[in-house]
Image: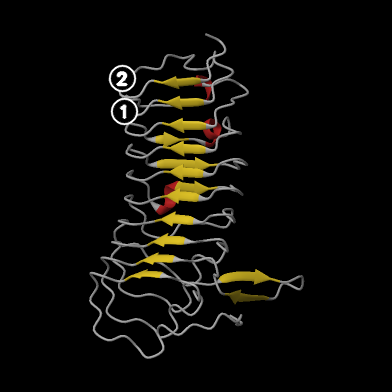
Amino acid sequence: MPRLSFLDLSHVPRLELLSEGFSNLPYLLHLNISGCGVEQLLASHFPTVCPIIELDASDNKLSVLTKDLLSKFSKLIFAVFANNSLTHVEVPYMRSLGILDLSHNNLTTFNITLGNCPYLKKLYLNKNKLTQSAHFAGLTSLRHLHLASNYNMELIGHTFEALEQLETLDLSHIFLENLSPHLFGFKQVNKKGRYKYLPMVHMRKLSLTGNMLQHLHPRTFKKLPFLDTLLLSRNALRVLPAGLFCSNPKSEDA
């Protein structure tokens, strides 16, 4: 079946990929191997020129996704690796990738590398072991970012400065005790190297549910002038400071 373009092997227990894997399927566009108990994916399992645009490898036993492997998927748009045992991921330049799901794994800040994915719109990193925010500089089109349930995660000022297009941000259940007043804002650099932080005008939804916040700085949300959904339930807030919900969409210097 050399012209096979759609292959669903989901929930085939204990699927074993031999050395050739899917390398003899040069027209394969959609592959589902979720729930198969797969322990390893290698570059040799796929054609030299790999046309796959949709890959679901969730609910397996994968521990590593190497740059060598992911570089094979130059046309990949939709990739799901949720519910594995991933401890190491190297995402290279992937020009077509639009959705990447790495949720429910064992990733830490120091063993995940996010390369330049200029068209990535949705990134799921919830329920991992991230203690610091990952590096998002190459994800300039990102619109939805899910970081929930990464316990004891530390967010420093201007963490999301490269994410001008961000619309949804989930920071729930990460044991946040404080929010920097400089956490939000898009960094714009002019030709002279001078910069300023502009409002994140596309942001519509922010979830901070289930954290340990006791205080909020009056300027915390100043750079989110068009936010329409703010979730602050299950925190330890006692007082909302004056001016907290007053925004000024005009640009301000750092």
**Depth order, front residue of 36/65:** 36
Location of residue 173 by image quarter = bottom left
Compared with 12, 228 (above or below) is below
Relative to 5, 220 lies left or right = left
**Residue 79: % across, % down:** 47, 37
Residue 154 x %, y %: 37, 65
Q: Check the image and report above or below for 41 versus 156.
A: above
Label 2, label 1: how many angstroms apart (C-alpha)? 7 Å
Q: Is residue 42 visible?
A: no
| Kind of residue at disc 1 | Gly
Is residue 214 found left or right of 200 in the rendered image? left
Query: Mark 1: which secondary structure?
Result: loop
Residue at x 45% of width, y 35% of height: 65
Residue 130 image point, x, y percent:
37, 55
Q: Which residue is mark 1?
A: 35
Of the 4 image quadrants, the one containing the C terminus is: bottom right
Task: Determine if residue 98 is in view.
Answer: yes
Q: Are marks 2 and 1 in contact (CB under 8 Å)?
A: yes
- Looking at the image, the residue that sits furthest to the right is 191
Q: Amino acid at mark 2?
A: Val
Q: Quadrant of residue 178?
A: bottom left
- The image shows residue 80, relative to residue 17, as above or below, that is below
Question: Which residue lies most toward the front here?
Answer: 228
